[in-house]
Structures are given as C-alpha cells and as structure tokens.
Image: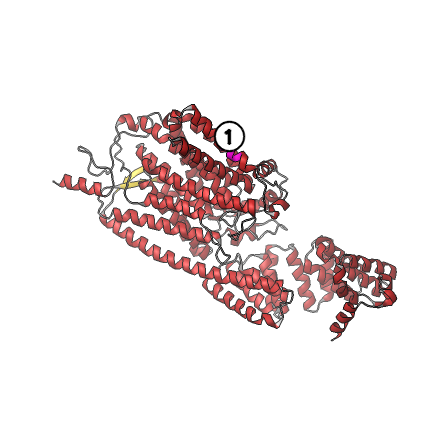
Amino acid sequence: MAKKKRDRQDKGQGVTRVPAGMDAAASGPVLPESRAGAEGSARPGAGLPGDVTGTGALRVFALMMFLTPALGVPHEEMLQDTLKSILVSFAVLGGALAFFWVQRNRENPLRWHGVIWLPILLMAYALGSMVWSHTYLAAVEAIRWFIFALLAWTGVNTLSRDRLPVLALGIHLGAVVASLWAALQFWINFRYFPQGPHPASTFINRNFFAEFAVCTLPFSALLIARARQSAQVALLSASTGFVIVAILMTGTRSALIALWLQLGLVLPFIAWRYAGQLSLSQWPRSTRVLTVGVLIGTVLGLGVIETGDPSIIDENRGTNALERGFKRTASIGPADESLNVRMVMWKATGTMIARRPISGVGAGAWESDIPLYQAEGSQLETDYYAHNEFLQLLGEYGLTGWVFLACLFSYLLFAAWRTWTGKSTEATEEGPWRAVFLCSLLALMVVSNVGFPWRMAVTGALFALCLAGLAASDARLGISSRWTAMPIAWRPSYSLVMMMALSAATVLAWYISDRAAESERKIVRATRLALTISASGNPNSPRWDRPRAEMLQLLREGIAINPHYRKITPISADEMARWGDWKNATWIWESVLTSRPHIVAVLTNAARGHTSTGNNARALELLERAKKIQPSAPAVRSLEVILASRMGDEARALALARQAMADDVVDFDLTNTTYNLAMRAGDYTMAEKAIRLKMSRWPTTSAAGFLQLGNLYANQLKNPDQALAFYQQALTLVPVADRHTLLPQIPALFWPKLGFPNGSVPAAATTQTSASKG
C-alpha cells in the first residue's frame, strides 16, 4: 500500500517511476549494464535520480534564451545589458520556483554534480571579499555567481534528453531574431535600439552580440541534423545561414575565429561521428543537397548585400558581410591596434596576478584597482574589464580562480573524453547533445580570450546551461562519484525552505532592478541634458538655467540611489567643466572617487576643479594621490604645472612645463598653461613650441594656433612678414562666412595686406568689434 502511494506520488511529481526491486532511496531508474556502459566510472546500478520533468523549468529557460537576446531597450535611459540581466535573473528565479513547487512533496533524492561547486566557490569568495575589498562590486559578483549556480543546478535536474530540443529551439530563435536586428542595422541603418557602432543588435556592443551568436551555432546545427521533413530542414538551414551572415557583419575577430573553427572542423566532425544517431543519416540525397544549397546560398546571397550605414562604410572594413568577415579575419595579427590596447590591459592584469597570486584583489575589483598595476606611462582607464576572462578571474580571485579554472578545464576534458570513448547504447544516444554542449563551450572559451562574455547576461546563462546539460548527461550515463554526478537526499521541508528563500530573492531582485533602472534613468537623462546644453554653443545662457537645475537634481537623485555608477556619471561633470561650472563638476568627480579611488583621470579632474574654486589644499592632496599611481601621466604632469602656477610659483611652474615638453609629455591643458607662462616670462621660443605642439596633436585648434603665432610674431618678436604669413594661414582655415569673427583679433595694419580694400573692415567684422567692446 505504501509502495503504491509512493509510486503515484512520484508520477504526479514528474519523476521516473521507481520499479519494483529498486532501492527506495533512488528516484530514477537503475541503468541496465548494457545501457549504462561498463567502461570507466559509469557503474551499473549507480542509483542516480532520473530526469525531473513536468516542472516547466526547462520551458522557462528556453523562453529566457529566446527573449533575452531578442528584446532590447528602445531608449537610452537604460543600458541594454541591464534589461538582459533583469530578464535572466527573473527567469532563473522563476524557473527554480516552479521546480521546487512541483517538488514540494518530494522525499526522493535529487541530483547533484561536482561542477556546481565551481560557481558556488566563486560566490563564496565574492561574499568574503566584500569584507576587505570593494563591497559593492563584490556583491554584484556574488549575485552573478548565485544566479549561475542556481541555473546550473536546476538544469542538472530538469534538462532531460527528450526535452533538450525545446531548449535548443529557444537558443536558435533568440539568435535568429537578434540577427534580424543586426542585419537591419547593417543594411538600412536601423536605429531603434541605442548602442555603440552598428551592428550590435539588441546589445550595446557588436562584439557582445557576435560572441553570443557564435556560441548558438552548435544548437542550430543539431536542430538541422535532427529535422525529418525537408521543409523544416530548409527553414532551419536558411535561418542558421542568416545567423552566420550576421556574425560576419560584425567583423568581431574572436567570433570569426570561433566561427571558422566550428564550420571548418568541429561541426563536420560531430556530424560524421554521430550520423547514425541523427535524422540526417536517413535523409534522401535531395534533402542533403537542399541543406547544403540553402545554407551556402543564404550566406552567399545575403552576404553580398551592401551596407546602408555610412559609419560602417567609413570604417573601411568592408561594405558587405562577406567582405567584412574575410577582411577582419585577415587583419588578425600582432600589429593590430585594438590588440595592442588589450595588451596594455593584459600586461597590467599579469602584474596584478603576480603581486596578488593568493588573495587576488577581490571579486569585481579589477576595474577599481587596475590603475595600481599599470606600467609607468600606460594610462588606460576607460575599460571596466580586462578583455580576457581567464586573466581577470585570476587577478580578482587569486588562488580561488586558479582552482576554478583547473577544475573547469579538467571537467571539460573529462567530458570530452567520455563523449569520444562512449560505446554503449546510452552513451551513443547522449553523444550528439554532449558534443553540442562541448562545441558551444569551445566557442565560448575562444571568445573569452579577448572579451568578457561570462559577464554578459545571456552568454553567461548559455554557459551555465551547457555545463548543466553535460552534468545531466553524466547522471543519465551513470557517471557517479564525489566529483561528478551523485544523489542528494531530499525532503518536502527542503523544498519549502528553497521556495521561501527564492521568494525572498525574487522580492530582492525586484527591488534591486527597480533601483538600478531608476538610477540609470536619472543619470542618463541628466547626461543627455548636459550634452544638449554643451551642443547649444552657449551653455551659460539664461535659457539653460532651468535645464541645468533639472540636470543637477537628476544627478543628485541618481547618485544617491547608486553612488557606484561610474560608466556615465563623469560625462556630465566633464561637460560642466567645459562651461566653467567647476563647483558642480567637482562634487560629481568626488562622488566617483568614493567608489573608484585610483582613477588618475578623475583624480586630476577633481583636483583641477578644487583649484578653480580656490581649494588648493584638497587639490594638492589629490595630486599626490595621482602621482603615487602614475607620476608620468600627462594629466598628472599638467596638473602639477597648473597648481604651481595657480599658487603663484610661476618660475617652478614654467620649469616643470619645460621638463614635460622635453619628455614629450603633451596634454591639452598643459600646452595652454605652458604658452601663458612662457608669454609672461618672455620665453617666446617655449611659447611657440607649446602652440605648435597643440596644433600637431589637436589639428582642430590650427586656426586659433596660427592666430596666436601671428600675434606673437607681430607684437613680441617684431617680425611682420612672418606674422602676416601666419595670419593668412589662419584665415584659410576658417570658412569665408566666419572670417569676421577672426579678423578683429588681427592688428588693423595687417588688414589691407590680407585682402581687405583700403583697410576697411566688413560690416560683420565691425559689428563684432563693437559687440566685443560693449
């Protein structure tokens, strides 16, 4: 009677019914020896729980993988990855809640797998590093790895082989819709989603899209190979070819390497190795020809369509997808500019690893601490990631990161070996799916060498699902040990506790998402106002008083919600400094420094702000902090000159300026300050050198530079012929309609020689002169 009740209970929970004679502690069938395989550690009768079905979790995850890449924010008041992070977080929490709700009466074991310890290890380290490192950034990392671990564990229990096609279809459709947006951006300059350079689909950066899309191709390929009807084969082949074209459009070279590796080697090998388990082995010749023809025809046909985006044309990297893909692949080499920029970050990260090999700098603290580890003179502070997941993990997590990577790669090699050597019926049936998971992870590892896809919400979710798929397959194959698949005891009370914890986590996620969205909205809106005011050309006009007040209020409210938001906040401060509003610019820079205290550019900007408002003591304090980090940085050398000048020690300021020029340290403000100091000191040679340096580094200042040189030679050096030549060069650089703004700044005795008859000034120039005197 008790047995019948238990069987009915298990059936209602969606688990495999326990057959007679099986140990009651196991909730899944014991694999017969012929299916479990007697090779290696796959012990017959391992007693591992079976797949848990009927919870809806897998459908939720499939929907997540479709919607997250397909949806984007149509405005600038939320970053694209903020939306994607919200979608993934709620989908994982919702899927896990659905799973535990169905298991609320379960008394049989669930599955565990050693690979789930890996994200838990990183989460534990992140929680610990909140105490001694950057609390906010470590908390973000802890949440990220919690979501990863929860998705992986739920997947280990629910990714049944017969339902994996649903997940694969969700992944494929997500890539197809995301590719549609990318193609529209490439072909017709579609601008519905705010982002960086096209085509980035619904991602803020085209590299992020390409890195995700290339990891989905193994799932698309398996769907094609499993299709039975020619219409399905044709549709899947065309849509997969479309995704390939979209990847080519991006020109992302890491994704292109992964693409060629899959198309040229891995996927053909998988098709050959597992042809007997796939529908393609039963296709008639016409269907095989159709598959190849549609796939290649789609890539070639769509790949030659020219771009309609002028900015892509200006990049000179190819005007159609095929040309762009091949050009960008051919450009891979040590002389590549973007690779050289990444090398600066990688070298600094290497120094970080060498100095903190055990403890690391703390979870997420790379972007905060990296200025401390950069080589002398290699100031690079605009990036928030190392563009190499492995290096950044080691830099942040230290010994914990080494353990994670060693265990991860060991498991993946073990999984690949088990997949290759599996000869049993069960292993053969599992083979295609295991190969697809491994192929997707291989693509992910390739792009992880020059990017940060683990930190992107949808790519990170795909990472977790692939690991979960392999782990679930291990359990079905009976690969059981302390470090692989194993049963864990379960009780109804455990499900209740998990549901309560996940409900609380969902409420917390809702609160965090709301606060993050509100903070981002306010800060982005304020930044847009700042840029609009600057673009007016007259930011201090009274008509901007009200927008300026609104902008400051938005910034105060946004920073109060999230004082750690570095990416956009400083832009507003930079614009305010251009207007001369140093007071408000300075408190914004100071707010950034409370969270990111080592950023030399922000330190020097805040110091200049304090100098402009008369707080020289605070400016000197910030200067000393900046000098300890990067003493030779142009911004630091420039600030040192400016501070000495502002504090009345002009002789020392000029000496510092001369030394900076001799060391070829050039900064825009430094050239201006050097010119003014040299003019007051009568060092006209140095004044001329400063002007010429500024003109060479910032060509847009050439007209003003030639005007300064002309005045220098006319008034101080008494060389009218050379002065006239400089004035002529200045006028040629200014449009005819705007020359009246330049002419009053030239001595009147030069006007006739410059082409103005009888020394007369055009009406426009006269008006300008009168206005200036007024």
Mark 1 burial class by Cα count in 10 Å: few <14, some 14-19, many 20+: few
Residue, far top: 285
Q: Nearer the viewer, residue 541 or 81?
A: 541
Q: Nearer the viewer, residue 78 or 153?
A: 78
Q: Give the colour scheme shown.
A: secondary structure
Secondary-structure class at tag 1 = helix
Q: Is residue 681 left or right of residue 621?
A: right
Magenta region: which residues? 295-299
Secondary structure mostly seen in magenta is helix
Q: Residue 90 location, x and y as percent?
A: 37, 52
Kindly tell me whether residue 357 is visible in this rendering: no
Q: Nearer the viewer, residue 214 or 585?
A: 214
262 over 624 or under it: above or below: above
Question: Within the image, what quadrant is residue 646 found in?
Answer: bottom right
- Quadrant location of the C terminus in the rendered image: bottom right
- Quadrant location of the N terminus in the rendered image: top left
Q: Residue 153 location, x and y as percent?
A: 34, 43
Residue bearing the label numbered 1: 264
Q: Is residue 609 left or right of residue 164?
A: right
Q: Residue 225 location, x and y as percent?
A: 41, 31
Residue, far left: 1
Numbered marks: total? 1
179 over 695 or under it: above or below: above
Magenta stretch containing residue 150, yes or no?
no
Q: Residue at x 61, y 73 (%)?
A: 542
What kind of residue is marked 1?
A: Gly
